[in-house]
Image (spheres, coloured by chain):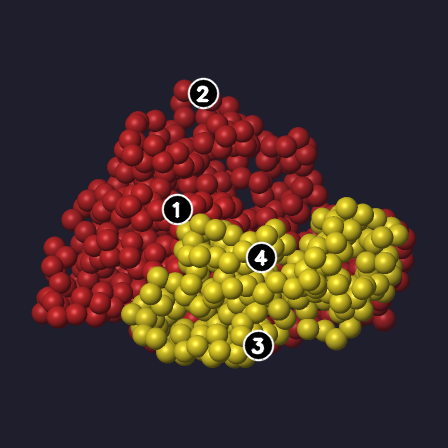
């Protein structure tokens, strides 16, 4: 490749100005990393230490917003984009003729430290194309993180990507050095993965995911925590949710899974990483991936349905206790018969609806099969999935605000977890009326069709299903237009301020 | 009395550093040779003690937060809340049925939002071994930022300069930070720090440009989340 400006052995061809060379590499490797959506620095609370640089704030901190409106919290880069694989959807695939670059571990450390000291970032997000082999790549990544934690005494947030196919010894080290570790699924099914990423194997993704989940749980149990992560507090009000049943929430675990998982870990068949990790990494005394693991799926590159995506997400949450599943609308970059043609619009609205569906799973007590069914495998993008569910279940409405249980309140369109909490606490002092609901910022434009207050509706309502659907679709239209117009709003802290909850 | 309360509250979050403020700090001769001490501090300390012992430390901290605000009625409001506090005790801030307490909660929320914004958007420039930043907040929030950045970079010399109120939060490496009112001359000298060439500035701008996805360009969203007024000293927009 003629237009390579750096060779893979890290010999830069720039000698006159090393800073300029570093800047060019940064340009290439930030550009190559930008399609990974995860940029949150959340999930870990750690104070600073004398002699070290950095701390970590549980709610995460955004430091800037890029021209696409997405939050910038971490220095998101690839170690190298000189990948030997040929995943069809990826701009770094070997068959593309693009400039390639590879950072040295020292360069990554310097950038992280210098950016951190200037308050540009909360930490590092490090991923990489496959250089040589998965193990060789993972080894370089571990070397970088080790250097950062020891020589550079960096105590801030690190999110590391595990390379599918890397050995579990190396993943163990990576988890000990980082705060969050993630393996991208990219595709929800084995078939689509094989079709899109012929060099990858689903078992190289799911097995390590399972190992990581068990190792995280083992470390949590050892430090006196519950095996599974605590979920948003609102789930404690629910009789049932994908996280398990209420009885277990109250007893301090996190659903029946928690109990089973704990048993599983304590029994011999557990797949937690057992082998001795690199001694230096153990000696650091860090917890294994205290911020948990996450993953990402690409939306709209192959023919996957929302049904497959949402059911896969639910399974990942339940089985591997993932903190987040991210959805990344595919941007046509490569010409390939198996892919949408160049210039195909980016499915931003679909991505937005999937995030909404994902929230229904995580915060609202919904199960995947309530949101989307096998015979109608895609969401209705014209309307948000919660409104859509309510319209299909008009027999359950209207609901009396003054007496309904939290589960039921949470299913009313226009009322979110914060609203439910406000209603519950205000109800203790006397009956509520519509005026009070308005003050609590309940979205009455949506909720009015589904509620009564003291037996009364808000004005005269036409309760014809089709009519309500039209009204709600109109209501959703403006939001939909904003998203299809451009991008959607990403601000990681929204979740926390909106729901007043722990970690995401 | 009011002035005393105000003084106490304004120096609030750094009260543990007051002793330090009384002493000249040798290793810190970059811009400051001495620190102002006036007899007011003693009075303020008394009021502070009264709040902490007769109400609670929590209330004291919350009121200190309110005292950073620019709202015109804030002094008067704190005074009234304090009177209520001496009467009702530590739960005073929950008694939202009092208009003053409600107003106080509003003010605190606004100050906190503003301060959190600056926590995200403060940008430091390296000058020698010191990291210096300028901000132009509406409220006097540098003391709020003190503990946040001291925890983030405990072993680094840094300074956050509030250009509006002409105050600087000074943090010598491995030592407690302190607040300092800047003299005209100090202030003017410090104005030039952003002109000093810092080699990582361009590096960051490059990253900032590269990380955006053109196909998802959304200026409206960016402006909503990062309002233009708050971009003044932010490296990537300079
Ligand atoms: S492994 Fe596949 S997805 Fe990852 S960088 Fe290489 S080509 Fe891209």
The residue pinned by badge 2 equals A267
The answer to the question of whether label 2 and label 4 lie on touching residues, with beta carbons closer than 8 A, is no
Say if labels 2 and 4 share a chain: no
Q: Kindly indicate which chain is depicted in yellow in the rendered structure.
A: B
Q: How many marks?
A: 4
Q: Kindly indicate which chain is depicted in red in the rendered structure.
A: A
Q: Can you tell me whether the CB of the residue at mark 4 lies under 8 Å from the nearest atom of ligand 1?
A: no
| A207 on left or right of A480 | left
Give the spatial CA distance, label 3 vs label 1. Answer: 32 Å
| Chain hosting mark 4 | B
Camera-nearest label, 4 or 1 = 4
The residue pinned by badge 4 equals B22
Say if labels 3 and 1 share a chain: no
Camera-nearest label, 2 or 1 = 1
Dot 4, crowdedness within 10 Å: few (<14), some or many (≥20)?
Answer: some
Is the N terminus of chain B in the top left, top right, bottom left or bottom right quadrant?
bottom right
SS label for mark 4: helix
SS label for mark 1: loop
The residue pinned by badge 3 equals B164
Judge by depth and name the residue closer to the eye, A472 or B207.
B207
Judge by depth and name the residue closer to the eye, B111 or A391.
B111
Q: Image height check: is A210 above or below A103?
A: above
Is the C terminus of chain B in the top left, top right, bottom left or bottom right quadrant?
bottom left
Q: Where does the image place residue A255, in percent across and percent down from the top left? A: 60, 34
Q: Earlier in the sequence, mark 2 or mark 1?
A: 1
The residue pinned by badge 1 equals A51
Q: Where does the image place residue B155, in percent across and percent down from the top left? A: 41, 51
Question: Is residue A60 visible from the viewing direction of this image?
Answer: no
């Amino acid at each position: 490749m003629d237009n390579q400006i750096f060779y893979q052995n890290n010999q830069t061809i720039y000698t006159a100005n090393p800073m300029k060379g570093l800047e060019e590499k940064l340009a290439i490797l930030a550009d190559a990393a930008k399609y990974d959506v995860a940029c949150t620095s959340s999930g870990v609370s750690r104070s600073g230490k004398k002699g070290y640089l950095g701390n970590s704030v549980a709610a995460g901190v955004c430091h800037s917003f890029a021209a696409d409106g997405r939050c910038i919290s971490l220095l998101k880069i690839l170690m190298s984009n000189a990948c030997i694989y040929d995943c069809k959807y990826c701009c770094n695939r070997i068959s593309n003729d693009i400039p390639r670059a590879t950072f040295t571990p020292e360069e990554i450390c310097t950038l992280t430290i210098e950016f951190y000291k200037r308050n540009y970032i909360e930490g590092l997000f490090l991923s990489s194309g496959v250089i040589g082999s998965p193990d060789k790549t993972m080894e370089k990544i571990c070397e970088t993180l080790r250097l950062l934690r020891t020589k550079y005494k960096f105590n801030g947030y690190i999110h590391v990507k595990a390379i599918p196919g890397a050995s579990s010894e190396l993943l163990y080290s990576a988890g000990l050095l980082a705060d969050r570790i993630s393996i991208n699924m990219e595709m929800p099914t084995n078939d689509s993965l094989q079709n899109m990423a012929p060099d990858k194997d689903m078992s190289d993704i799911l097995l390590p995911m399972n190992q990581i989940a068990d190792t995280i749980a083992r470390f949590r149990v050892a430090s006196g925590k519950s095996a599974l992560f605590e979920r948003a507090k609102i789930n404690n009000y629910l009789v049932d949710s994908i996280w398990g049943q209420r009885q277990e929430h109250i007893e301090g675990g996190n659903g029946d899974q928690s109990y089973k998982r704990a048993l599983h870990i304590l029994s011999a068949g557990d797949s937690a990483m057992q082998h001795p990790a690199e001694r230096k990494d153990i000696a650091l005394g860090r917890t294994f991936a205290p911020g948990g693991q996450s993953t990402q799926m690409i939306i709209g590159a192959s023919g996957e349905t929302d049904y497959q995506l949402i059911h896969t997400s639910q399974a990942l949450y339940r089985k591997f206790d993932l903190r987040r599943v991210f959805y990344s609308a595919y941007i046509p970059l490569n010409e390939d018969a198996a892919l949408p043609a160049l210039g195909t619009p980016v499915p931003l609205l679909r991505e937005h609806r999937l995030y909404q569906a994902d929230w229904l799973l995580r915060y609202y007590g919904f199960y995947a099969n309530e949101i989307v069914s096998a015979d109608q495998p895609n969401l209705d993008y014209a309307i948000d999935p919660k409104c859509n569910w309510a319209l299909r279940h008009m027999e359950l409405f209207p609901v009396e605000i003054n007496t309904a249980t939290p589960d039921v309140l949470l299913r009313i369109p226009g009322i979110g977890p914060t609203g439910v909490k406000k209603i519950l606490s205000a109800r203790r002092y006397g009956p509520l009326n519509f005026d009070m609901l308005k003050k609590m910022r309940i979205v009455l434009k949506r909720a009015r069709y589904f509620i009564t207050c003291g037996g009364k509706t808000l004005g005269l309502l036409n309760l014809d299903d089709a009519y309500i659907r039209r009204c709600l679709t109109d209501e959703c239209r403006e939001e939909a237009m904003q998203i299809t117009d451009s991008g959607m709003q990403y601000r990681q802290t929204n979740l926390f301020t909106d729901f007043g909850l722990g970690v995401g | 009395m009011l002035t005393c309360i105000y003084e106490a509250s304004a120096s609030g979050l750094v009260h543990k550093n007051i002793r330090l403020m009384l002493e000249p700090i040798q290793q810190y001769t970059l811009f400051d040779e001495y620190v102002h001490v006036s007899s007011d501090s003693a009075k303020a300390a008394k009021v502070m003690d009264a709040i902490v012992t007769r109400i609670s430390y929590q209330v004291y901290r919350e009121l200190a937060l309110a005292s950073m605000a620019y709202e015109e009625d804030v002094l008067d409001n704190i005074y009234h809340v304090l009177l209520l506090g001496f009467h009702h005790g530590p739960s005073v801030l929950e008694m939202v049925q009092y208009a003053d307490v409600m107003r106080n909660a509003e003010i605190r929320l606004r100050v906190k939002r503003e301060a959190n914004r600056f926590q995200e958007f403060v940008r430091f420039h390296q000058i020698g071994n010191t990291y210096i930043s300028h901000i132009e907040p509406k409220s006097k929030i540098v003391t709020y930022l003190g503990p946040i950045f001291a925890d983030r970079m405990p072993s680094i010399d840094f300074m956050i300069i509030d250009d509006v109120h002409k105050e600087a939060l000074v943090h010598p490496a491995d030592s407690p930070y302190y607040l300092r009112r800047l003299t005209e001359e100090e202030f003017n000298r410090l104005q030039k720090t952003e002109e000093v060439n810092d080699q990582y500035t361009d590096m960051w701008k490059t990253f900032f440009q590269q990380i955006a996805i053109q196909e998802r360009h959304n200026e409206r969203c960016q402006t909503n989340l990062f309002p233009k007024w708050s971009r003044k000293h932010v490296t990537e927009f300079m």
